[in-house]
Image (cartoon, rainbow, N blue to C red):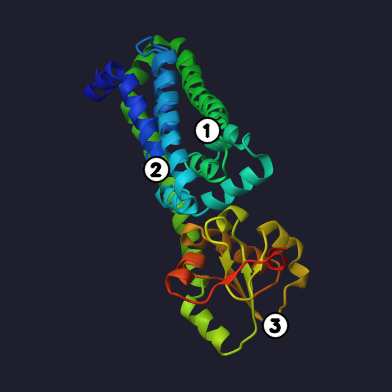
Amino acid sequence: MPIALDVFIRYGFAVVLLWVLGEQLGIPIPSTPLLLTAGTLSATHKLSLPMILAAALAGSLLADSVWYAFGKRYGGAVVRLVCRLSLESTACVRKTEGYFSKRGAPALLLAKFVPGLGTVAAPIAGQSGMSYGKFLVFDGTGALLWALTSLLGGRFFGDVLKRNPHALSLAGHFAVVIFLLLLLGFLGWRMLERRAFLRSVRMARLEPTELKRMMDDGQPVFIVDLRHPLDYLPDPRTLPGALSLTPDKLVEDSGRIPRDQEIVLFCTCPSEATSAKMALTLRRMGIRRVRPLRGGYDEWKRLGYPLVEIVTSTAA
């Protein structure tokens, strides 16, 4: 039996707990391939399925509780930090905030099944003011469903192999190789997807200094603040003249967007994810003069450029 496989069988509970804990804390080491492998090996009765499930649940709840506490105390800054650590940092902020706006606490039941949302859901729950008891119930149930799905998927594969003892023996010997191939394939697909997206963003974005010059020169600029209402809580300000619109509302009212002006979109997502996606969406709708603001609201604020208080008419 390979040494790595022997170690995993001997210390499976600890390995799964630490692996899931690390992933949920933000380390880009996906747990799904590990849980599938553990589920397959449980068919040989060398690993206990209930014990592995308990380890995955404990690791997930421990990490999520840490991020919940940080999100409750530090708000949007922690959410953006978690997104920068995530393999899906280009999308996770807007996706998760949208999930919470539409579904509330039940969004936690499905968050771990959606790439990029599993880690960032916990700090957003804390940021939104959800009670810890309520968070624990919904997050724990979601983590249980997520871990159980992967483990049972692996166990089903293992049970199929049991019908052919020789095949099950080979699977046991090559479990480490299978796991590594799954892991590398998963990481490779995510990285290629992210690189393609970031390449499209870099080609289109507008520098804050250029926008500031345009505003100083009196050029007509249509500025849209795409941030979620949760982002306004710690700092209820925006760029001068900016309209606060959700992505759905922006698409819905696209007919009212001026075609003879520069359209500038900004958000607080890492890599200007939401702004870039909306810019691409509007371009496909025939609105060509649209660009995401590099660095979004945070970079504009860091440079010390003018900000104004958000008023009801601006956010309408």
What's the CA distance linking mark 1 and mark 2? 21 Å
Is 79 drawn above or below residue 238 in the view shown? above
Q: Which residue is mark 2?
A: 26
Element type where label 3 sits in the image: loop
What's the CA distance linking mark 3 and mark 1? 49 Å
Residue drawn at x 78%, y 70% as measured from the top left: 255
Badge 3 or badge 2: first in the primary sequence: 2
Q: Which residue is mark 1?
A: 132
Residue drawn at x 36%, y 25% as measured from the top left: 16
Is 88 drawn above or below residue 206 in the view shown? above
Q: Position of residue 90 (x, y in %)?
A: 49, 55
Tag 2: amino acid? Gly
Horizontal side of 237 relative to 82 (left or right) equals right
Residue drawn at x 67%, y 39% as measured from the top left: 103
Q: Position of residue 168 (x, y in %)?
A: 39, 15
Badge 1 or badge 2: first in the primary sequence: 2
Element type where label 2 sits in the image: loop
Tag 1: amino acid? Tyr
104 and 85: which one is in front? 104
What's the CA distance linking mark 3 and mark 2? 43 Å
Q: Nearer the viewer, mark 3 or mark 1?
A: 1
Q: Which residue is mark 3?
A: 260
Furthest-left residue in view?
3
Badge 3 or badge 1: first in the primary sequence: 1
Element type where label 1 sits in the image: helix
Tally of marks: 3
Tags 3 and 2 in contact by the CB under 8 Å rule? Answer: no
Other residues around mark 2 within 10 Å, as few (<14) / some (14–19) / many (≥20)? many
Horizontal side of 254 relative to 61 (left or right) equals right
Tag 3: amino acid? Asp
